[in-house]
């Protein structure tokens, strides 16, 4: 039997919800494995490619384990039931006859048909010596700054993943959907382990995991085994299958040399892109006319109207130029950049546009221009 506060159990279930299978080949994967051990309550959810595990440690005020044991509880009912209890209530879980679980709180008692925990797939053992660690706050920021550029089209499976590589004391994450490219790197401090070649992690798995990471000071341990990568931080662990294949080379995508370079106020540029894109919502193609003194963003839509917005250029070199690009894609890039100024490099109206924060050499973004009827 287990007694725990609703809030502790609810938080744990939130952390593992992304791995719960709605329509699983095996019914066991539609459940949450609940293991009451000598010092903690462990919640695990798993599907064909992802496993998530959250550990609630024993504490006199939050969790008491009176009897050890394991069972698998139907996830949909379990989550809804725990959510329905008040946050300050005590929830009692007890295994009873015929593979049933008794859930009691707030003067309510549920009896759910549970499943045999021995049929639930175990988490893989991944040796920690084969990995490295990074501060969770830094890792969380990195993931957010690249995942938006990953493809959501499963027909391009490689591009739905994020390239992850540690080398020379840096962790590098790369994502691209073929139109946008996002690169973010961070120092690993004294940990100079390396992963070679880079592995490809499903972007959705990485995004779901990072969103649940605490903002408090802690480290995330990253380890790799055959076809599997493991991320572990304090009491939260994710194991994900890797995507097999070769990720596009970054060097091949970065154009050289540049004929036009300029520096803009990042916030002002973002706001101008957002305003101009309002007119071009259905086909969000906007134009960018660059001169030495200012830039002008513009768009027009049949039966709607047109818009233009001007912005002062803080630094400029090279040739004046006019390019067209997807305004929503540019907005995503600018929202990811953590800098007061942004640096743009262009090599022509049909060549990729490079966008960088001026305060860091560890971030790089690329967007491919759009050919329109306004251009020869």
Image (spheres, helix red, strand yellow):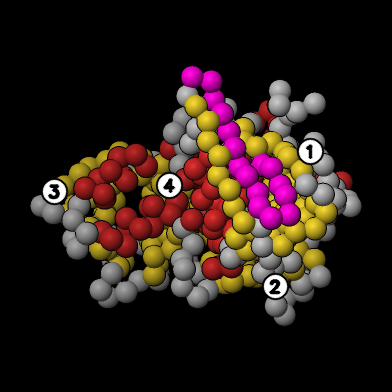
The C terminus is located in which quarter?
top right
Specify which label sits upstream in the sequence, 2 or 4. Answer: 4
Measure how far apart labels 2 and 3 are at the Cα level: 50 Å
Q: Which residue is mark 2?
A: 188
Residue 243 lies, with reference to residue 7, above or below; the image says above
Q: Which residue is mark 1?
A: 349
Measure how far apart labels 2 and 4 are at the Cα level: 30 Å
Q: Are marks 4 and 3 in contact (CB under 8 Å)?
A: no
Dot 1: what SS? loop
Q: Residues within 10 Å of mark 2 (few under 14, many from 20)?
A: some
Residue 209: x and y, percent? 52, 54
Residue 271: x and y, percent? 51, 50
Dot 3: what SS? strand
Specify which label sits upstream in the sequence, 1 or 2. Answer: 2
- What is the residue that sits farthest to the front in this orientation? 293
Q: Residue at x 35, y 71 (%)?
A: 58
Dot 4: what SS? helix
Specify which label sits upstream in the sequence, 2 or 3. Answer: 3
Q: Residues within 10 Å of mark 1 (few under 14, many from 20)?
A: some
Q: Which mark is residue 17?
A: 4
Q: Residue at x 47, y 45 (%)?
A: 18
Instruction: Please name whichever residue, 127 or 252, is drawn nearer the observer in this view of the structure.
Output: 252
Specify which label sits upstream in the sequence, 4 or 3. Answer: 4
Mark closer to the observer (1, 2): 1
Q: Which residue is mark 3?
A: 108
Q: Are marks 2 and 4 in contact (CB under 8 Å)?
A: no
């Amino acid at each position: 039997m287990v007694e725990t506060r609703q809030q502790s159990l609810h938080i744990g279930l939130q952390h593992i919800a992304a791995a719960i299978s709605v329509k699983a080949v095996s019914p066991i994967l539609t459940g949450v494995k609940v293991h009451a051990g000598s010092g903690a309550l462990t919640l695990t959810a798993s599907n064909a490619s992802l496993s998530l595990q959250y550990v609630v440690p024993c504490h006199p005020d939050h969790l008491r384990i009176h009897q050890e044991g394991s069972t698998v509880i139907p996830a949909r009912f379990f989550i809804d039931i725990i959510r329905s209890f008040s946050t300050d209530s005590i929830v009692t879980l007890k295994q009873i006859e015929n593979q049933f679980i008794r859930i009691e709180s707030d003067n309510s008692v549920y009896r759910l048909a549970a499943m045999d925990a021995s049929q639930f797939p175990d988490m893989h053992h991944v040796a920690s010596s084969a990995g490295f660690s990074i501060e969770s706050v830094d890792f969380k920021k990195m993931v957010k700054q690249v995942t938006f550029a990953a493809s959501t089209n499963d027909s391009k499976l490689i591009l739905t993943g994020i390239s992850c590589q540690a080398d020379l004391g840096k962790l590098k994450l790369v994502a691209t959907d073929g139109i946008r490219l996002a690169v973010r790197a961070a120092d690993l401090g004294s940990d100079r382990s390396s992963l070679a070649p880079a592995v490809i992690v499903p972007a959705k798995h990485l995004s779901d995991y990072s969103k649940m990471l605490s903002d408090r000071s802690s480290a995330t341990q990253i380890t790799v085994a055959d076809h599997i990568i493991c991320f572990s931080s304090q009491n939260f662990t994710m194991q994900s299958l890797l995507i097999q294949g070769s990720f596009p080379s970054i060097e091949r995508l970065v154009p050289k040399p540049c004929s036009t370079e300029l520096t803009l106020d990042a916030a002002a540029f973002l706001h101008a892109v957002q305003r101009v894109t309002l007119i071009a919502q259905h086909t969000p193609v906007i134009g960018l006319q660059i001169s030495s003194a200012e830039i002008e963003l513009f768009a027009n839509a049949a039966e709607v109207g047109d818009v233009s917005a001007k912005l002062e250029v803080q630094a400029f070199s090279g040739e004046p130029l006019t390019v067209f690009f997807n305004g929503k894609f540019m907005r995503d890039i600018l929202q990811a950049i953590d800098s007061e100024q942004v640096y743009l490099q262009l090599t022509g109206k049909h060549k990729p546009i490079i966008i960088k924060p001026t305060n860091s050499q560890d971030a790089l973004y690329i967007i491919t221009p759009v050919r329109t009827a306004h251009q020869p």
